[in-house]
Image (cartoon, rainbow, N blue to C red):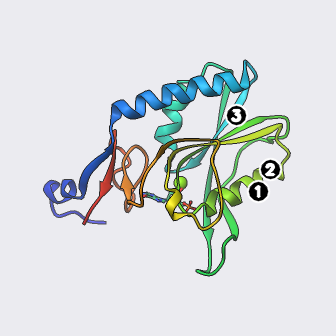
Amino acid sequence: MEFRSKEEFESKIKRVVVTEDEIRAKIAEAGRYIDSIYDGRPILLVSILKGSFVFLADLARAVSVPCEVGFMAAKSYYESTQSSGIVHITMDLDRDISGCHVVIVEDIIDTGRTLADVVKLLKSRNPLSLRVVTLLDKPSRRIVPFEADMPLFTIPDLFVIGYGLDYGEYFRNLPYIAEYGE
Ligand code: IMP
Ligand code: MG
């Protein structure tokens, strides 16, 4: 992706959808919620790369239960008529999760396909428990029924960037979430 100028790059940031303050407040709330659920038991936060790396960094610092972090990258390939498919793990966890309380950390749930497959895969590895926290949820786009245990923000059908989310690999470093516009 090429931008002719800084102005052209900035013109793609159409409007702010979730501010830094709103993100900070919700993450503090999510941290307290996680602390109350696990009540001192250790957890493994599993970040689905790349989109969730910023969210993971802030969420990890908002919890006070003992916490490990792990990273996974997944790509899903589907025919347009398929409602579920094979998730291709391009980078896997570096540890066995049996005996772990796993919390999957995702940036956004759109069609639901990626997480439905990742959850199925991780459940087959026999964790003690498994929950899903997502920063953003676009329920109107769902193809596979899927509900996160903790969706922080529900948004309409917009393409969003920032706070880890990209368009063409750019914009992940915006500190807020914005609508992308041509
Ligand atoms: P799924 O459709 O629920 O499987 O979501 C697949 C992936 O698409 C998400 O994890 C994001 O990485 C990406 N994605 C979906 N919607 C957006 C968006 O609005 N902005 C940026 N990435 C998105
Ligand atoms: Mg993602």
- The residue carrying mark 1 has its beta carbon less than 8 Å from ligand 1: no
**What amino acid is at disc 1?**
Lys
Image quarter hosting the N terminus: bottom left
Q: Position of residue 28 (x, y in %)?
A: 49, 25
Mark 1, residue position: 120
Number of numbered tags placed on the structure image = 3
**What amino acid is at disc 3?**
Leu
Q: Position of residue 104 (x, y in %)?
A: 65, 43
- Quadrant assignment, res 91: bottom right
- Quadrant assignment, res 82: bottom right
Q: Earlier in the sequence, mark 1 or mark 3?
A: 3
Indicate which label's residue lies in the foreground, 1 or 3.
Answer: 1
Mark 2, residue position: 123
Q: Marks 3 and 2, Cα distance to the nearest angstrom?
A: 14 Å
Q: Marks 1 and 2, Cα distance to the nearest angstrom?
A: 5 Å
- Tell me whether the residue at label 1 lies in contact with that at label 3, contact meaning CB atoms closer than 8 angstroms: no
Q: Residue at x 82, y 41 (%)?
A: 127
Q: Earlier in the sequence, mark 3 or mark 2?
A: 3
Q: Position of residue 81 (x, y in %)?
A: 62, 81
Of 59 and 147, nearer the camera is 147
Secondary structure under tag 3 reads strand
- Quadrant assignment, res 163: top left
Q: Residue at x 58, y 80 (%)?
A: 80
**What amino acid is at disc 2?**
Lys
- For disc 3, the neighbor class at 10 Å (few under 14, some 14 to 19, many from 20) is some
Mark 3, residue position: 44
- For disc 1, the neighbor class at 10 Å (few under 14, some 14 to 19, many from 20) is few
Secondary structure under tag 1 reads helix
- Tell me whether the residue at label 1 lies in contact with that at label 2, contact meaning CB atoms closer than 8 angstroms: yes
- Tell me whether the residue at label 3 lies in contact with that at label 2, contact meaning CB atoms closer than 8 angstroms: no
153 to 140, vertically: above or below = above
- For disc 2, the neighbor class at 10 Å (few under 14, some 14 to 19, many from 20) is some
